[in-house]
């Protein structure tokens, strides 16, 4: 028999958790609802508020220090948010969700490394003030005074925010701007200034949440990562852009988690993703989202595709063959020209290149942005390791089973996900990936937090094969070890995968996908099954991502939960746009540059993510079509320069950018 006091206590605990979620999700929802900006750095800003509070309390003491921190930390965070909006986001308005999300991902890297650089890696504790550190009697049981403060303070803040948005001139203007920004500007109102203030306000709410949570639990480096996912889930459940939905969704999730942790602990951490997926499938705009909301028409240069560039197909083919030939020579220079470590690094680079290629098939050719592609990468690695451990050490059997399972999962996930569009598609794929991420911790057969490792791997079938780790091929100085042989196996599969993908995209199937990306309605009018083509592209993409995960397990010999983490998907999107979407080879180049540059930078600078994030933000703003667009841009610049030069006249050759198929 469950006592009334226990139910009441669990309800209060759920409301406390929900109020903290409200502070995290409300700002996220407001920013998206008005500005159409999907702020991936929101979790890091939340954590920054907690760290600032820690420093203020250490300096001023636990008495007045907490109250000053509760006021000062959000102001600092809000000012940082205003600077981000003014100088990084404002130039991108009208360029689509992806551009803005990528810039905020860059700030995620910057803020994360800045926190590590300033405050170190140890956990911190933000003590509540003495006036809130006791307990109070409620219905015969003691309850934390601070928890009651969180509930009351959160309720007051929600009411104040609601009043600000609905009953003030500021709220009226930003609501009008969300409906028709140009009209507001025509009335003589500087809507950009209001957007800057709103973005700062949303970030300040996150800062308040960080201070509040900091006194509720310990503060650590992963605090931002752990809060951003529930915040996204809550915003989706409530409806993107709905403040009321964010508040109600946060309270529902908090109460649900409180009860689930007591009665169904096995499902703890998984339930919110199941709810989000169910809500999106039954009501795609969320519980309180606008049913008439559509993806804004602003196009992103990232998804425009380059397809060809200034080089002829035959020239690109020769360059590709040359690149493969150079890669084939890499193992021969190990321990003579350079360390054998670089052979392993190139293996990692090629696996990431295959993973980037897989995402480009769906992102570059259909415009579907998946923030959950790590699902297939992790699933591929785990499937291969489970085959090695429980079935057979045959690499061929493991990879075949991996591709088959990832194909089936991609069919299911794709069938459910493509029912929604825009940011909802981004977040539902994130939800599926996080579902698997949480799931691998729950089962013994997946190794829990330790993952899977220690399996034998052989090249062969039916018990007849060879273990590359135990053999050497050739003679000095052309002696190839097991690591070198793995290198060639990965190289062959990556090249074959690229050739198959290129053939597919140059076929009529690829032409239909490009048409889908340009105009779904027009493609449907022409008689094509748009959803069917999207599903096939997503399925092929998932299968190739699974192959990349399988190769990771083959080469590294282990699989860990971190392979499913959403930051893997974020970095993967970064690689794709860095190289250039819709080209196949561009994302592979982007993966090579990202992995290589990150490895080189980390060898010289401890806070390498900070610099990498800053460089990526500049890249997003100034080179939106990727590295493969640079030759065409330089050619166009040279053409304009010649046209402007005295005496060139009309004889100046015009820039001719090929739009032929990929090669």
Image: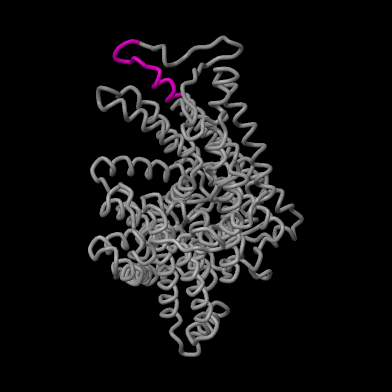
Query: What span is in magenta?
Result: 475-488
As drawn, 471 above or below 601: above
User: Which of the two residues, 660 or 10, is positioned nearer the viewer here?
Assistant: 10
Residue 642 part of the magenta-drawn span:
no
Q: Can residue 649 be seen in the rendering of this structure?
A: no
Q: Position of residue 612 (x, y in %)?
A: 33, 51
Q: Position of residue 441 (x, y in %)?
A: 53, 37
User: Which of the two residues, 15 or 321, is positioned nearer the viewer here?
Assistant: 15
Looking at the rendered structure, the number of numbered marks drawn on it comes to: 0
User: Which of the two residues, 634 or 49, is positioned nearer the viewer here?
Assistant: 49
Q: Residue at x 66, y 57 (%)?
A: 280
Q: Position of residue 306 (x, y in %)?
A: 49, 53
Query: Is 474 on the left or on the right of 352, as rendered?
Result: left
Hey, which residue is sitting farthest front in the picture? 140
Residue 484 part of the magenta-drawn span:
yes
User: Which of the two residues, 547 or 230, is positioned nearer the viewer here?
Assistant: 230
């Amino acid at each position: 028999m469950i006592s009334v006091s226990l139910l009441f206590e669990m309800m209060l605990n759920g409301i406390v958790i929900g109020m903290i979620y409200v502070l995290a999700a409300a700002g996220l929802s407001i920013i998206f609802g008005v500005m159409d900006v999907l702020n991936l750095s929101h979790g890091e800003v939340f954590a920054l508020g907690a760290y600032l509070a820690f420093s203020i309390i250490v300096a001023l003491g636990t008495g007045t220090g907490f109250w000053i921190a509760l006021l000062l930390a959000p102001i600092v965070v809000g000012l940082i948010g205003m600077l981000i909006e003014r100088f990084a986001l404002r130039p991108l308005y009208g360029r689509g969700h992806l551009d803005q999300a990528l810039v905020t991902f860059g700030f995620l890297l910057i803020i994360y490394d800045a926190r590590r650089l300033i405050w170190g890696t140890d956990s911190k504790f933000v003590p509540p003030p003495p006036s809130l550190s006791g307990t109070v009697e409620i219905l015969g049981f003691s309850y934390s005074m601070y928890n009651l403060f969180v509930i009351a303070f959160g309720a007051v803040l929600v009411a104040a925010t609601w009043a600000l948005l609905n009953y003030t001139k500021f709220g009226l203007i930003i609501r009008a701007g969300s409906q028709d920004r140009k009209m507001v500007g025509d009335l003589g109102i500087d809507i950009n200034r209001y957007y800057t203030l709103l973005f700062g306000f949303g970030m300040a709410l996150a800062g308040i949440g960080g201070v509040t949570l900091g006194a509720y639990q310990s503060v650590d480096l992963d605090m931002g990562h752990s809060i951003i996912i529930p915040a996204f889930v809550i915003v989706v459940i409530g409806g993107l852009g709905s403040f009321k939905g964010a508040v109600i969704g946060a309270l529902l999730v908090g109460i649900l988690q409180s009860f689930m942790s007591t009665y169904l602990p096995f499902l703890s951490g998984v339930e919110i993703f199941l709810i989000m997926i169910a809500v999106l499938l039954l009501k795609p705009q969320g519980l309180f989202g606008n049913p008439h909301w559509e993806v804004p028409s602003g196009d992103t240069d990232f998804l425009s595709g380059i397809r060809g560039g200034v080089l002829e197909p035959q020239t690109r083919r020769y360059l590709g063959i040359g690149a493969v030939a150079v890669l084939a020579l890499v193992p021969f220079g190990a321990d003579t020209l350079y360390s054998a470590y670089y052979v392993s690094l190139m293996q990692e680079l090629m696996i990431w290149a295959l993973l980037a290629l897989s995402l480009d098939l769906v992102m570059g050719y259909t415009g579907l942005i998946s923030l959950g592609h790590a699902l297939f990468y992790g699933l591929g690695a785990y499937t291969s390791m489970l085959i090695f451990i429980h079935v057979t050490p045959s690499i061929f059997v493991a990879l075949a089973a991996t591709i088959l399972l990832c194909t089936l999962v991609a069919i299911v996930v794709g069938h459910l996900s493509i029912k929604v569009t825009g940011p909802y598609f981004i977040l539902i794929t994130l939800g599926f990936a996080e579902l698997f991420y949480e799931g691998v911790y729950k089962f013994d057969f997946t190794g829990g937090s330790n993952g899977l490792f220690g399996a034998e791997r052989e090249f062969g079938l039916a018990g007849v094969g060879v273990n590359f780790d135990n053999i050497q091929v050739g003679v000095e100085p052309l002696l190839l070890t097991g690591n070198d042989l793995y290198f060639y196996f990965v190289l062959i599969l990556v090249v074959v995968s690229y050739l198959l993908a290129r053939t597919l995209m140059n076929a009529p199937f690829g032409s239909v996908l490009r048409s889908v990306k340009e105009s779904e309605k027009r493609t449907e009018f022409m008689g094509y099954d748009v959803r069917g083509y999207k599903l096939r592209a997503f399925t092929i993409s998932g299968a190739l991502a699974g192959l990349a995960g399988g190769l990771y397990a083959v080469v590294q010999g282990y699989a860990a939960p971190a392979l499913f983490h959403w930051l893997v998907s974020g970095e993967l999107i970064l690689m794709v746009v860095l190289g250039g979407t819709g080209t196949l080879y561009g994302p592979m180049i982007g993966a090579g540059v990202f992995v290589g540059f990150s490895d080189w930078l980390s060898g010289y600078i401890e806070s390498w993510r900070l610099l990498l994030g800053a460089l990526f933000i500049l890249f997003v703003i100034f080179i939106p079509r990727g590295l493969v667009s640079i030759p065409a841009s330089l050619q166009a610049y040279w053409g304009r320069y010649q046209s402007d030069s005295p005496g060139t006249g009309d004889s100046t050759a015009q820039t001719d950018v090929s739009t032929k198929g990929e090669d």
